[in-house]
Image (spheres, grey):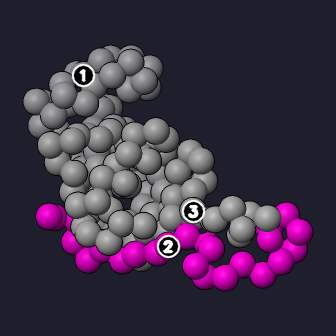
Amino acid sequence: MATDTHALKQKMWDKMSAGPFLMVGLANSGTHSEPLTAQLDKDQVDTIWFFIGKDNRLAGGGAAMAQFVSKGQDFFACIDGQVRIDNDPAMIDKLWNKQVEAWFPGGKTDPNLALLRFDIDSAELWEADVSLAGKLKMLFGGTIRSDEAGSHAKVESTVV
């Protein structure tokens, strides 16, 4: 896995673009995380956006955690940060798409529409890039060495 913050961020963004589903929950709230579809803005790579209903358990905001598994199940992320409602009309326009419209039939002015902003504080990332030798060992029950298994990194801040 790349070691510089910018490359790590780009790798995560690329993987999320291909499969934008995350489990998101409020930290220390005693409630379960829930699946949400990320709306990514390349101009704000330290922020993930989600369209939610105003009655959603995350709408109250606060410290949050999100878990991500890439579409190919070869990249994993645990992200922590803060969530809050940010109903900026310009951002709603920028992120609006047909998938969101399906959930909010009233359109951008749907009375239940809320735009949840997740500001990333830190992330822990894993890339399961198992080598050819490692894959063969998995098939035949051999022991996979750490240099055959992929990589892991902690990113204290996503800001470059």
Q: Which residue is mark 2?
A: 151
Residue drawn at point x = 17 percent, y = 48 percent: 44
Q: Which residue is mark 3?
A: 129
Position of residue 109 relative to residue 43, above or below, is above
The quadrant the N terminus occupies is bottom left
Q: Nearer the viewer, residue 101 or 154?
A: 154
9 is within the stretch colored magenta? no
Q: Which residues are magenta?
A: 137-160
| Secondary structure found at label 1 | helix
At label 2, which amino acid type do we have?
Answer: Ser
CB within 8 Å, label 3 to label 1: no
Q: Nearer the viewer, residue 76 or 150?
A: 150
**Nearer the observer, disc 1 or disc 2?**
2
CB within 8 Å, label 2 to label 3: yes
At label 3, which amino acid type do we have?
Answer: Asp
In this view, which residue lies farthest toward the front? 133
Q: Which mark is residue 75?
A: none
| Secondary structure found at label 2 | strand
141 is within the stretch colored magenta? yes
